[in-house]
Image (tube, grey):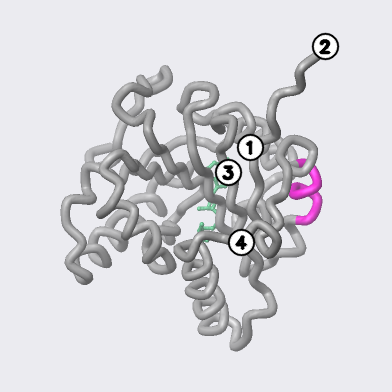
Amino acid sequence: MGGLDQLGSGTRSPEKFEKNIIVEIGSGANPFILEVSQDYRDRFKNEPETHYFALDINEPELRRGKSLQEQASAAIGLKNVKEKIHYLKASGEMLPFPDASVSEIIMSNVLGDPGAPFSGKMSMVEEITRVLKEDGTLKIVEYYTPWVADGAIEKVRTYLEEIDSKKEGLPTQEKNSDAELAQKAKRIFGDDKQIFVRRFRKKPPTTEL
Ligand SMILES: C[S@@+](CC[C@H](N)C(=O)[O-])C[C@H]1O[C@@H](n2cnc3c(N)ncnc32)[C@H](O)[C@@H]1O
């Protein structure tokens, strides 16, 4: 397992990472930070407390993604990110993080993966809800077969509220990230019709009076 970070069988102590944990579920050989994410790169430079955890159940794919990201980071002269980007062989159905400890979760082409069982996607949504901080956000990106994600996104809506990106006004970094994704989709598909990025925020807890 050399090269992949180990969490062991329990959950990782949050002290070191509690400020700003970003988790990508199902990063595979194509971690989100690899290509489309000037904004995340900027955050590593500007936010010393930001840590990124890329998770996948498929170890060879995870290793490939790690190696590609390291090459890409080196090519753009991004240094000192190694200790801030972690690769974990772990399942989105059993996230190795304590309750309410994660600021942001990203899933790219995971809920829309036709090969993944629906029940597993449901378990992931429950785990995501558990580990997100109260104001934490989930970003769902789909550009292969986005229609496959529809049923799972309904489940997301029962736990998290959708952020209306147009009304709320996104930070510039996020807008740039969406534009970069649209360009990527255009390269892959010849147009950007298949792409969507949806953002959700954890609902505040219900208070009984
Ligand atoms: C279609 S690939 C997407 C890879 C990459 N995120 C992308 O956008 O190209 C789906 C990935 O989700 C991973 N995956 C499926 N079920 C998972 C689970 N329960 N936990 C973590 N990863 C999972 C697969 O191993 C695969 O790498």
Helix, strand or loop status at disc 1 = helix
Q: Which residues are magenta?
A: 150-155
What's the distance in space between the residues labelled 1 and 3, CA to CA?
A: 14 Å
What's the distance in space between the residues labelled 2 and 1, CA to CA?
A: 31 Å
* Kind of residue sitting beneath label 2: Leu
Which residue is at 68% across, 52% downward?
163
Dot 1 corresponds to which residue?
124
Residue 170: x and y, percent? Answer: 57, 60
What's the distance in space between the residues labelled 4 and 2, CA to CA?
A: 33 Å
What is the quadrant of the C terminus in the image? top right
Could you tell whether 152 is left or right of 197 in the image?
A: right
Cβ–Cβ below 8 Å for labels 3 and 4? Answer: no
* Kind of residue sitting beneath label 4: Gly
Which residue is at 55% across, 29% downward?
131
| Residue 149 falls in image quadrant | bottom right
Whether residue 113 is visible = no
Nearest-to-viewer mark from 3 and 4: 4
Q: Earlier in the sequence, mark 3 or mark 2?
A: 3
Residue 138: x and y, percent? Answer: 59, 46
Q: Earlier in the sequence, mark 1 or mark 3?
A: 1
Dot 3 corresponds to which residue?
137
Relative to 25, residue 123 above or below? above
